[in-house]
Image (tube, rainbow, N blue to C red):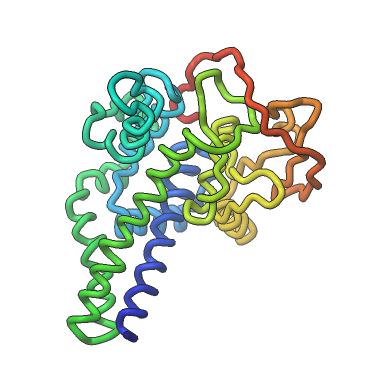
Amino acid sequence: MPQLVLAVIVGCAVCQIGIFCTTVYLHRTVAHRALTLAPSVRLVFRVLVWITTGIRPRQWAAVHRKHHAFTDVEGDPHSPHLQTTGRCPRLRGALHAHAGWLLRAPATDVGRWAPDLAGDPDLVMLTRLFPLACAVSLGAPALLGWAISGTGAGALGGLVWGGLVRVFVLQQATFAVNSACHLWGRRPFRTREQDRATNLAVLSVLSMGESWHNAHHASPRTARHGVDRGQLDSTARLIQALERCRLVSQVRWPTPESLDARRVEAGQRERSASVLTRSAAVGRSGTHRRWTRSAPAGPGT
């Protein structure tokens, strides 16, 4: 039993590190340029991304930027709303957005959607070492379990909980934002007409704040997604802590004025409670409204 508890603890710790690497580094730093990491911190995140997720940063950023450019219209790599024919289109769309797109979607042109990353030698190297990253991502927890317990059972527990289960949970946290956060939830902010990104509070803990997806699509380049009072965004908290330690700079924090300008109901606005201003909430609005579609956003938005 103690070995099982140890394996679960190791798995949870490595999983949380992996999710933070995805949210802070891959999403808010690489894909959207919402902040700038100090060179030493950037190196740490790159190594941890390589070990804990095995994700190819250039490819990940390119797919995500394309998703923002064509959200929920033809060209979106993982929209749940493009399955309009056949039986159970909503279910098929949800499955496609959750994980099915990985098997069927055409490859995304990294040169078009992430040209700013093409010349980064570290990211190029990480992409080439992708198979090794996968092996290390599963093997490191097993070695850690063996080093702590000194037994084969500890190594197996590390592999299962720190490797396989951790990868499963980490992927579900990301996949759920792609699927559930375009199907259910509230839409308090204006986005483009066909953009159906929602805020889904129930996923905020698991996704480290990524499930405030409507707010993110309304202001993609801000470093905080849970912008209203009571909205948990642990990724933004970590960024704030790094900023206080002067390990990150040029952080794009949302302001009450910029958020109020994007509210669906101008007459019933909810005052922003960003980390920087601590403004009090004065109203709520969950009304859905159609708005004129603007031109697709380009790379980096």
Q: Quadrant of residue 187?
A: top right
Q: As displayed, is residue 251 above or below residue 287? A: below
Which residue: 48% across, 50% down? 24
Q: Is residue 53 left or right of residue 203?
A: left
Q: Is residue 58 left or right of residue 207?
A: left
Q: Quadrant of residue 78?
A: top left
* Of the pair 122 and 186, the residue shown nearer to us: 186
Where is residue 36 shown, x and y percent of the image?
52, 45
Which residue: 24% across, 26% down? 106
Q: Farthest residue to the front: give it.
A: 87
Which residue: 51% across, 53% down? 208
Which residue: 32% across, 37% down? 95
* Of the pair 223 and 142, the residue shown nearer to us: 142
Quadrant containing the N terminus is bottom left
Where is residue 177 shown, x and y percent of the image?
45, 42
Q: Quadrant of residue 154?
A: bottom left
Q: As displayed, is residue 253 above or below residue 72? A: below
Where is residue 242 shown, x and y percent of the image?
57, 58
